[in-house]
Amino acid sequence: MVATAPLRNDASPPTFLSLAGHPVRWRLLSELAYSDRRVGELCALLGSPQSLVSYHLGRLRGEHVVSRRRSSADGRDSYYVLELARLRELLAATGTALHPGLRVVSAPPRSPALAVRHRTQILFLCTGNSARSQIAQGLAEYLAGDKVEARSAGSHPKPLHRNAVRVMRERGIDITGQRPKHLDVFAARRFDYVISLCDRVREVCPEFQGRPDLFHWSIPDPAREGGGTQTYPAFRRTADELEVRIRFLIDLIDSGEPPCDPEAPLADQSGTRIERFRAPDR
């Protein structure tokens, strides 16, 4: 005789399945997985009208999977951001709703005994190279260890912000030895990833050798929120967000997989060139 366990009375599919299972919304999640995008870019990438793309972005925002931020380069435009931590929570809940053995667990770290054949080269960019990109550089090297060599630069370098130093010191990371640099300093250097953290610097980002993967993370400038000590909570929020994003980036590096298949560059509705992610030669 075969014993069967009765189904639970509440055995209905989690709402996340229908949310992410729609083809348009899945494409949006895929396009936002590594880089923040404007709605015009998403329309070009999906080949869909803005009304349709905006509707599905609204559905994703309603479940707090995607958020929207006003562009610092053009206040009439906005960037859409995939909330990776929230997405991970929903995926974990979806698995355990079916069976406890399907819970999402973090992959074990790679054995330190394995030699690092190639230190992943990352360049973080923002306008002043005084806060966001300096914090990102320090976090990347601290969290990834010998796997990563991180650098940072800006289009209009300014002195290192004291609150950037302070917020990193809280995390046990000393960035006082880092110096602001113009992005031209690295024009001839090869990187695996170039990550812009500022909407303005994204507009002037030059071509880099070696065809690195280009990501954009639309992160507000914490130094513009108030003045003096009043900006410090903003620096904490910035460091928190960068740490989450960089941990996911390290997971990508550990996987050894490129973000997506290389494709020809596209253009949005205004004719602006859209770079898809490009796999570096490793």
Image (cartoon, rainbow, N blue to C red):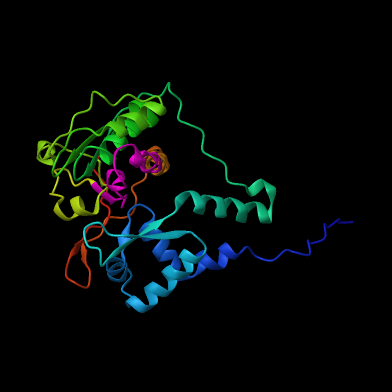
Viewer-nearest residue: 137 or 16: 137
Estimate the x, y position of residue 275 in percent, counting from the top left.
22, 58
Estimate the x, y position of residue 103 in percent, counting from the top left.
62, 47
Viewer-nearest residue: 246 or 223: 223
Is residue 40 among what the camera can see? yes
Q: The magenta stretch spans which residues?
A: 213-238
From the viewer's perspective, is 198 left or right of 61?
left
Residue at point 90%, 56% (across, down): 1
Q: Is residue 180 magenta?
A: no
Viewer-nearest residue: 267 or 199: 199
Estimate the x, y position of residue 266 in percent, counting from the top left.
22, 65
Residue at point 17%, 56% (across, down): 203
Q: Is residue 227 magenta?
A: yes
Viewer-nearest residue: 243 or 167: 167
Most distant residue in the top direction: 113
Q: How many marks?
A: 0
Figure quadrant of residue 55: bottom left
Most distant residue in the right direction: 1
From the viewer's perspective, is 69 left or right of 159?
right
Estimate the x, y position of residue 267 in percent, counting from the top left.
20, 67
Figure quadrant of residue 15: bottom right
Is residue 24 among what the camera can see? no
Residue 181 sits above or below residue 1 on the image: above
From the viewer's perspective, is 59 left or right of 173?
right
Assign the C terminus to one quadrant of the image: top left
Residue 161 sits above or below residue 86 on the image: above
Residue at point 37%, 42% (across, down): 242
Figure quadrant of residue 18: bottom right
Residue at point 58%, 46% (across, down): 104
